[in-house]
Amino acid sequence: MEVVDLQRQSVRELNQFLHHDAVSGKVQALEVLNPDGAHNIAVGVNTPIAIAIRGHAGYYCAGMNKHASVTIDGNVGWGVAENMMSGTVRVKGFASESAGASAHGGLLVIEGDASLRCGIGLKGGDIVVGGSVGNFTAFMAQAGRIVVCGDAGDALGDSLYETVIYVRGRIKSLGSDAQVEPMRETDYAAVGELLNRAGLTHDPMTFKRVASARQLYHWNADANQEY
Amino acid sequence: MCGIVGLLVKKPELKAQLGALMLPMLTGMSERGPDSAGLAVFGDALPAAAGRRYSLHAPDWNYDWAACVAALNRVLKHPVEFTAKGNHAILIATDDPQKVAAAVAEGFPSLHLLSVGRSIDVYKDVGHPTAVAERYGFKGLTGTHLVGHTRMATESAVTPAHAHPFTAGEDFCLVHNGSLSNPYSIRRKLEPLGIRFETDNDTEAACRYLEWRMREGDNLEAALESSFRELDGFFTFLIGTGDSLALVRDPFACKPAVVAETDDYVAIASEFRSLAKLPGVKHANLFEPAPEQLYVWKS
C-alpha cells in the first residue's frame, strides 16, 4: 500500500499523486498519515482507489469524489464529500457543517453526529448518519436520501424538493414545506438497504419518513409571504 | 473571515507553558486572519492593594515609555511601575483607575489604552500573526487562560485599534469571528448612557454591550441570552474574564469552532488544524459547540 505522510508532504502533492500517478488502477490503496485537520485532503479523486485517512481531516475532505472509497479514522471539518459524484466516504467520528453538500451520487456514512446543514442542496447522493444531525439538515435538498439514526435539529428539510429523509429519533422541528409522511414498503426497503451498506443494524420499522409537501413548488400570492 | 483561539490550563504547573502551548494555535489560524493578531492573557490577579494592570499601545515602536511614566508619576499620587517592549507597555498603578485612565488620555492622547484589570494583559497589532507573536514574545507568556484572534478585516479599517481582542470595563475581553449587522443601533443605545466608543468596529459594540449588561447586574449567561435578541448578525464569540473563558455561537452557527478538552487543558479554535499540535490532543474529548449554547470554563 502507498503511504503519504502529510507531515512530510503537502496536500497538493498528495492530490497530484491521486490525480495523476494513481489513476487507472495503478494504485489500489493509499494511506494518509498525520492529516492534522488539513483542508482539501483527497479532493477531486476520479479513480477507484481505497483511501484511508488516519486522523482528523479539515474542510472539503473527499470533495467531488468519483469512484474512490475514502475512510476517515476521525472527525472532519466543513463540507466532507461535498459535490460527491460516486463512490463511498465514511467518517468514523463526527462531521462538521454542510456534510455531503450538493452531492450528486455515492454514499456518505457518518458514524458519529453531523452538524448543521448536513445534506444541504443534496442532488442525488445518499447520506447515512449514525448519530444525530444539527439544524437545517437537507435545506433545499433536491434528490437522494438521508437516513438519520439519532435525532434531528430545527428546521429539518426546510424548502425540500425531492430528497427523502428518514429519521429514527426525535425531530426538533420541521422546516417550511417539510412533512412527516407514512412509511411505505419501498421506504422500509430503502432504509434497510442504506443501513446495510452503512453497516448499521437498526430496525427500519423504527424510522419516520420526511418529505416535501410540495406547496412551495408554485408561487402562492395568497400566502402573504407566510410559509 | 477571522480565526479565534482560546486556551485554559487546568494544572498550576502548566501556567508557565501557556504561551508556548498557544503559539501554534494562533499561528495555525494565520490563513483565516493574516492582517492583524492579538491576545488577552490572564494571570494571577493582583491583590487589591497592589492596584491594577494597564496595557498600552503607542504609535511608535521606539516610544519613550520612561518619559511617559515619569510624567504620569508627576500627576498621580502613587508611583507607577512599568515594563515595556517596543510600542507596548504594561503599567501597574495603584491610583483610582479612572484617574489613571484620565491621566493617560489627557497627557498622552496618542496612546491607546488596551485593557484595565487585576489580571488581564492585552497585546494587539497589525501584521501577520507569526510576526505579531514574535514582536511581543507570545511564546513566553504565562498565566491561567488566554483568548487570541487573527483578523481578516471585512467591515472596518486595519489598524492596531481595530484588531481584537476588544475590552470594556475591567478584566473583560471579547474576540469575534463573524460580522454584526446592527453595531450602530447598539452604539446609539449605549452612547447616551455615557459609554464611549473608540473605533467604528462591530465587535467593539458587542463587547461594550455585554460588559454593560454585566455591570447592570446580568451574569454572563443572562448577558449572552440578551445578546441573542439584541445583536443581529453572525458570530462566534470567545470571552475572557478574570476567572473564565466563555464561548457562544449565533443561532445559524455560520462561523466555526471546535473544542478539545483533556485533564490538562481546554483549547478552543476556529478549526481543528490549530489544535493538532497540542500535547495529548489525539486523546482529547473533541466536540463542536452547538449554536445558541453557552460554554463556560473556570480557571
Image (tube, coloured by chain):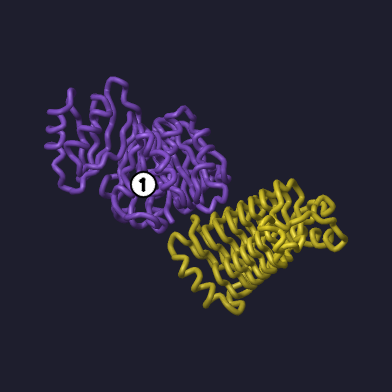
Chain colours: A yellow, B purple
Q: Position of residue B260 (x, y in %)?
A: 51, 44
Q: Which residue is rendered at x = 49% and y = 33% of the image? A: B220
Amino acid found under the numbered disc labelled 1: His
Q: Position of residue B205 (x, y in %)?
A: 40, 44
Residue B190 place in picture, x, y as percent? 40, 38
Q: Quadrant of the C terminus of chain A?
A: bottom right
Above or below for B56 versus A201: above
Q: Observer-nearest residue: A43 or A199? A: A43
Q: Is residue B269 visible?
A: yes
* Left or right position of B287 against A205: left
**Residue at coordinates 83% horizontally, 60% vertically from top-left?**
A187
Q: Secondary structure at mark 1?
A: loop
Mark count: 1
The vertical placement of B21 against A100, above or below, is above
Please state if B26 lies on the left or on the right of A189 as rendered: left
Task: Please name the residue shown 25% across and 33% down the image.
Answer: B101
Q: Residue at x 52, y 46 (%)?
A: B249
The quarter of the picture where the N terminus of chain A appears is bottom right
The residue that label 1 is drawn on is B164
Callout 1: chain = B
Is B97 left, or right, of B150 in this rendering?
Answer: left
Q: Looking at this rendering, what residue extends furthest in the top direction? A: B49
- Looking at the rendering, which quadrant does residue A83 occupy? bottom right
Where is residue A128 drawn, in percent x and y? 70, 58
- Estimate how packed mark 1 is, as few (under 14), some (14 to 19) or many (20 or more) residues with alpha carbons within 10 Å: many
Residue found farthest to the right: A185
Instruction: Give A169 or B101, whichever is nearer the viewer.
Output: B101
Residue B263 seen = no
Q: Nearer the viewer, residue A165 or B137?
A: A165
